[in-house]
């Protein structure tokens, strides 16, 4: 169908929606979209379904709008559409119209990330989309779900996740708010992301009052002049800021001392212990301790697997809820 023909079809369908013929319009959108896809006119299909999803959502026909929105993403995948500003903008525009309570939103978000993983440059999904979804969930005060996305987002995400950690700690009325900061910073550092860890730390500290215990001075690099250094009443904040300083220098011995000094703080939280071990390996090549297990079972496993063990679980996917709880996959969104 020519561009002129597409415009004529779009106008006819818009008139049908505006006249309140929602079900008939939805079915017609799907019928025409199937026809276009069979003809491999994917650009026309996408424009048609995007237009229909937006219009139906604006008319509060959320189930029908959701159906067309997800059909649009199916066409994205069918067409192997690249992840770029234009294709992402359509997703964000539709997502911004979904009511919080619409069940189809979860499927739409999951499908969108599957597309960006398949057609984009990031195996965990596009950072800009993670930032949008994480910000949306933060504003809805769904902090655990928001954290999952902001950890995989942009500089803005790292700034926002610092505020999230503070807000979450206040909401939970936690004695030591810094535990929420530590869980965020350690996850960034376990993936060797000092930049985002530092942004998260800075924004957590600036989000609200942090009681001080003392002040000192520290050299942030061996050749630097000493600069002011706050010692907080919250041991988790002190642990986190000293860890950030340690990974930015050749500080293997300092790291080992830090682990020993604060082991009583984090040692009962298996997820924190795992993250600390990951950081030691990533920055200082400190081998992770071998897990204790059944010797006979391990021998049998080695015999039948040619000596190789099972791959370790990713600690970034094991945190969630309050500190120490298990984390769900990044696609479990609502």
Image (spheres, helix red, strand yellow):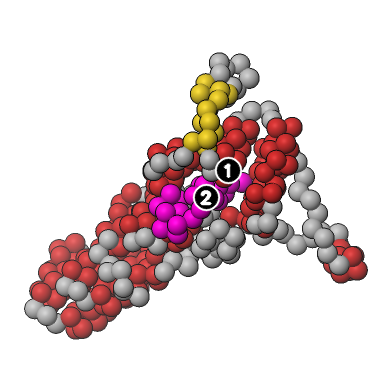
Query: Judging from the image, what secondary structure is the residue with disc 1 in?
Result: helix
Q: Residue at x 42, y 54 (%)?
A: 170
Residue 90 on image: x %, y %: 29, 58
* Residue sitting at x 58%, y 24%: 218
Q: Which circle's residue, 1 or 2, is located before the other in the chain? A: 2
> Would you name the residue on which mark 2 appears?
176
* In-front residue for pair 325/290: 325
Give SS at disc 2.
Answer: loop
Instruction: Give the residues in magenta.
Output: 165-193
312 above or below 23? above
Q: In which quarter of the image is the C terminus?
A: bottom left
Q: Picture quarter containing residue 324?
A: bottom right
Q: Examine the residues drawn in magenta and state their main secondary structure.
A: helix
Residue 111 visible from this viewpoint: no
The 10 Å Cα crowd at callout 2, few under 14, some 14 to 19, many 20 or more, is some
Task: Verify whether residue 273 appears in magenta.
Answer: no
Circles 1 and 2: CB distance less than 8 Å? yes
In the rendered image, which residue does mark 1 sit on? Answer: 235
**Horizontal side, residue 154 vs residue 62: left or right:** right
């Amino acid at each position: 169908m020519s561009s002129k023909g597409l415009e004529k079809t779009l106008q006819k369908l818009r008139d049908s929606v505006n006249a309140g013929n929602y079900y008939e319009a939805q079915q017609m959108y799907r019928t025409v979209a199937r026809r276009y896809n069979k003809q491999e006119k994917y650009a026309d299909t996408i424009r048609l379904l995007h237009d229909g999803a937006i219009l139906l959502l604006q008319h509060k026909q959320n189930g029908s709008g959701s159906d067309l929105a997800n059909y649009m993403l199916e066409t994205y995948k069918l067409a192997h559409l690249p992840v770029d500003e234009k294709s992402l903008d359509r997703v964000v525009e539709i997502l911004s119209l979904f009511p919080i309570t619409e069940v189809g939103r979860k499927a739409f978000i999951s499908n969108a990330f599957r597309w960006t993983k398949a057609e984009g440059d990031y195996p965990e999904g596009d950072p800009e989309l993670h930032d949008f979804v994480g910000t949306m969930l933060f504003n809805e005060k769904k902090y655990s779900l928001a954290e999952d996305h902001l950890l995989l987002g942009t500089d803005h995400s790292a700034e926002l996740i610092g505020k999230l950690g503070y807000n979450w700690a206040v909401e939970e009325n936690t004695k030591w708010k810094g535990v929420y900061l530590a869980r965020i910073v350690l996850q960034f550092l376990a993936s060797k992301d000092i930049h985002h860890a530092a942004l998260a730390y800075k924004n957590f500290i600036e989000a609200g009052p942090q009681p001080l215990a003392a002040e000192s001075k520290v050299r942030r690099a061996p050749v630097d002049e000493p600069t002011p250094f706050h010692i907080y009443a919250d041991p988790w904040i002190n642990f986190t800021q000293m860890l950030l300083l340690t990974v930015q220098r050749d500080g293997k011995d300092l790291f080992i001392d830090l682990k020993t000094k604060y082991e009583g703080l984090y040692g009962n939280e298996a997820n924190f212990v795992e993250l600390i071990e990951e950081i030691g390996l990533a920055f200082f090549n400190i081998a992770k301790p071998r897990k204790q297990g059944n010797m006979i079972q391990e021998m049998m496993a080695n015999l039948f697997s040619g000596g190789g063990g099972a791959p370790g679980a990713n600690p970034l996917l094991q945190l969630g809820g309050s500190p120490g709880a298990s984390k769900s996959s990044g696609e479990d969104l609502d």
